[in-house]
């Protein structure tokens, strides 16, 4: 099968962001850098030879000087230092064969982006991965990929499969917003 290209992955990510925005209210406006990487690089980034994708978070602080209005003749210019803090999530995708797994991986990583921007730093990796797997699983079911949905439960990494078994029933029963509210204590707000 054909290997996923950057252009195809970018187009797919845009489509999925819009779908997640309509379904769950994800913010689909901020830029998310996307990188297609090889197996060796992915293994180094994730410490797992099985990863198809990952999300990398970085905090970028910019300090700049702003000239204030109100300059009078003979007076010294007034300036003010301002600090801008940006929380940037980059998505890395394995250059694997394109197929049904790639959209599910992107949904998972886009959910990480949403959680970082709306809830903050995860304190509990099982809840963090569980939410992402639950949303990805719901997407798989909605699009008729039941075998892949069932495979999530069998993931050998327990923070993924265990988190899914904990969170998916909450998502199904209470909906996305209420499920997030129930689990927000597992995240710490960024202090800027």
Image (tube, rainbow, N blue to C red):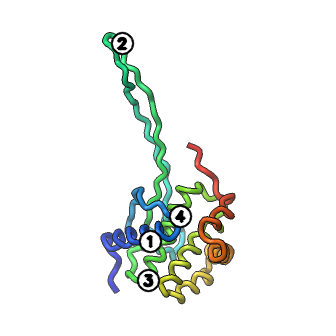
Q: Which is in the foreground here, disc 2 or disc 1?
A: 1
Mark 3 and 1 residues: CB-CB less than 8 Å, in contact?
no
Judge depth for marks 2 and 4 and give the one in front: 2
Q: Which residue is mark 4?
A: 112
- Neighbor class of circle 3 (other Cα within 10 Å; few <14, some 14-19, many 20+) is few
**Residue 26 placed where, x, y %?**
49, 63
In space, the residues marked 2 and 3 are separated at their CA atoms by 66 Å
Q: What residue is shown with label 2? A: 75
Which of these two is toward me, 126 or 13? Answer: 13
Q: Earlier in the sequence, mark 2 or mark 1?
A: 1
Residue under the image location 31 percent in, 12 percent down? 73
Is the C-beta separation of discs 2 and 1 under 8 Å? no
Mark before the other along the chain sequence, 4 or 1: 1
Give the residue pinned by disc 1. Answer: 19
For label 3, the residue is 100
**Element type at marker 2?**
loop
Q: CA distance from mark 4 to mark 1?
A: 16 Å
Callout 1: 10 Å neighbours few (<14), some, many (20+)?
Answer: some
The secondary element bearing badge 4 is classed as helix
Q: CA distance from mark 3 to mark 1?
A: 16 Å
């Amino acid at each position: 099968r054909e290997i996923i290209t950057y252009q195809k992955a970018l187009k797919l990510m845009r489509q999925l962001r819009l779908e997640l925005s309509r379904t769950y209210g994800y913010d689909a406006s901020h830029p998310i850098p996307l990188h297609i990487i090889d197996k060796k690089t992915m293994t180094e980034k994730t410490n797992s030879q099985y990863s198809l994708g990952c999300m990398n978070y970085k905090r970028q602080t910019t300090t700049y000087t702003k000239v204030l209005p109100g300059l009078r003749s003979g007076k010294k210019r007034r300036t003010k230092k301002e600090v801008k803090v940006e929380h940037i999530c980059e998505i890395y995708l394995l250059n694997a064969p394109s197929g049904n797994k790639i959209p599910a991986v992107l949904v998972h990583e886009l959910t990480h982006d949403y959680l970082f921007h709306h809830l903050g730093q995860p304190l509990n990796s099982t809840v963090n991965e569980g939410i992402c797997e639950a949303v990805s699983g719901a997407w798989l079911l909605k699009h008729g990929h039941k075998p892949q949905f069932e495979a999530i439960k069998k993931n050998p990494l327990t923070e993924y499969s265990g988190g899914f078994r904990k969170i998916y029933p909450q998502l199904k029963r209470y909906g996305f917003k209420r499920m997030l509210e129930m689990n927000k204590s597992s995240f710490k707000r960024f202090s800027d």
